[in-house]
Image: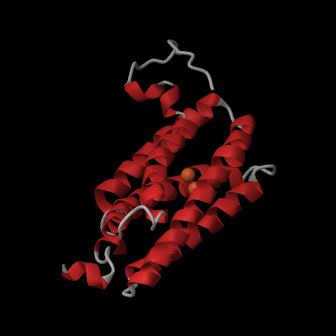
Amino acid sequence: MSNHQTTSEKSPKKNLGTESDIVNLILEDHKSLKRLIKVMKDSEKHRLAERAEAFAEFAPLLVAHAKPEEQVLYIYMKQDEDLREGGFEGDVEHQLADQLVEEIMRTDDEDLWSARVKVLAELVEHHIEEEEEDLLPDFKKESEENERRFMGQKFLLLKTKLLEQGGLETPHESRILPRSEEKH
Ligand SMILES: [Fe+2]
Ligand SMILES: [Fe+2]
């Protein structure tokens, strides 16, 4: 990763440096997701209410991260012979996470809720690890920096759109806490 500043760009806009490289944008998102995962998966250390709060923050963030990742990065990967399988693997893991999020919304039993949130946290943690260790380095090898910056701009655009309209009003908002918590 180079910190090399390009002065050849026409516009001095903030996001045209390496920070708009899609890889860096993805890594930034992962930091926030990982912070919440830590709370969600540890039922010894964190009370249910705390974990529910973390989940409430996590669910829309996950959508706003995963959808642009699928629509910009995985699509690119699926068109490259060497990266294709990784792109599909990403899609499948996202689908599993989506399903779990939906199920968590519909879960009333506290222990079942807790178990599902834990599994979701572990699944996404593992997925993020794979992206950081394999998928992103492989993608970086096969792509050009200007492509990655262009993709980064698309990623940001989609993410902003999702955060503005879609991401926050998906089923996530309707049911965040297990029913017993909602009563208090
Ligand atoms: Fe992903
Ligand atoms: Fe990711």
Residue located farthest toward the bottom when viewing the structure as drawn: 109
Q: Is residue 16 above or below residue 77?
A: above
Horizontal arrangement in the rendering, residue 118 relative to residue 142 (left or right): left
Q: Quadrant location of ligand 1?
A: bottom right
Measured as percent of width and height from the top left, residue 23 is found at 58, 39
Residue located farthest toward the right when viewing the structure as drawn: 82
Q: Which quarter of the image is occupied by the N terminus?
A: top right
Q: Is residue 104 above or below residue 93?
A: below
Residue located farthest toward the front when viewing the structure as drawn: 44
Residue at 50% in and 12% down: 7
Residue at 60% in and 29% down: 146
Measured as percent of width and height from the top left, residue 181 is found at 27, 78
Q: Is residue 3 above or below residue 170?
A: above
Q: Is residue 24 above or below residue 61?
A: above
Quarter-of-image position of residue 59: bottom left
**Label total for image:** 0
Measured as percent of width and height from the top left, residue 68 is found at 50, 53
Residue located farthest toward the top when viewing the structure as drawn: 7
Q: Which quarter of the image is occupied by the C terminus?
A: bottom left
Measured as percent of width and height from the top left, residue 57 is found at 34, 59
Horizontal arrangement in the rendering, residue 136 relative to residue 100 (left or right): right
Residue at 43% in and 48% down: 32
Colouring style: secondary structure
Quarter-of-image position of residue 165: bottom left
